Image: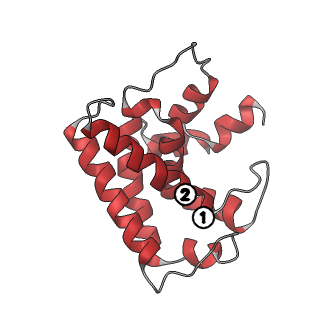
Amino acid sequence: MTPEEKRYIYPPFIVRETEKIDPPNFLQTKVADFLSLIRSIWKISNNDYQEQFWVKQDSPIRGDNYMETMETFLGDSEAVLEANEAGRVSMTKKQRKLLQELCDKVDAFWDDPDTPASEYGENDEAIVNDPKWQKIGEYAKLVYEELSGDDLDKWEKQRK
């Protein structure tokens, strides 16, 4: 993917972080250091991204779907929250609260028997169009903005 494609697809924080060259022995000590977590939160927040890459399977991002995003998000968020509790990762009380609440919302949706299973993307369209999922996406946008410092509305206007 070219830098221009990255800047078109992803918001500024994610682009800046992926363009950095990590120094040797890079330690993740603050929530903003966990790019895969923040990227998955952004994916949860962005219905256009989900339509393009989960539903339409429009490359250049191969193999991206609801299940892949959920596995990344749930695993990373659990690890970050545990590391924060142990004092190894710093985040504000507000960041922690928002992230925990997003985890709870995603877990409840994931465990809901009315949520269609979608291991390989086969039901991603139904998930993307589910009003419960869309509410989670709205909340994820708030979490993303709090963790990254990006203003997604401003970014979307600049992009178009």
In the figure, residue 107 lies in which quadrant? bottom left
Type of amino acid under label 2 = Glu
Q: Are marks 2 and 1 in contact (CB under 8 Å)?
A: yes
Colour scheme employed for the rendering of this structure: secondary structure
Residue that lies at the very extreme toward the left in this rendered image: 93
The quarter in which the N terminus is drawn is top right
Residue at left offset 29%, top offset 58%: 101
Q: Which mark is residue 15?
A: none
Element carrying mark 1? helix
Residue that lies at the very extreme toward the top in this rendered image: 24
Residue at left offset 69%, top offset 70%: 121
Image location (x, y in percent) of residue 146:
34, 41
Q: Which residue is mark 2?
A: 71
Image location (x, y in percent) of residue 86:
26, 35
Seen from the viewer's position, the closer of residues 136 and 37 is 37
The quarter in which the C terminus is drawn is top right
Q: CA distance from mark 2 to mark 1?
A: 6 Å
Crowd band around label 1 with a 10 angstrom C-alpha radius: few (<14), some (14–19), many (20+) = some
Asked if one can make out residue 69 in the rendered structure from this viewpoint, the answer is: yes
Residue at left offset 35%, top offset 57%: 102
Residue 36, above or below 139: above
Crowd band around label 2 with a 10 angstrom C-alpha radius: few (<14), some (14–19), many (20+) = few
Image location (x, y in percent) of residue 78:
39, 50
Type of amino acid under label 1 = Met
Asked if one can make out residue 146 in the rendered structure from this viewpoint, the answer is: no
Image location (x, y in percent) of residue 109:
42, 73
Residue that lies at the very extreme toward the bottom in this rendered image: 114
Q: Which residue is mark 1?
A: 67
Residue at left offset 46%, top offset 44%: 152
Element carrying mark 2? helix
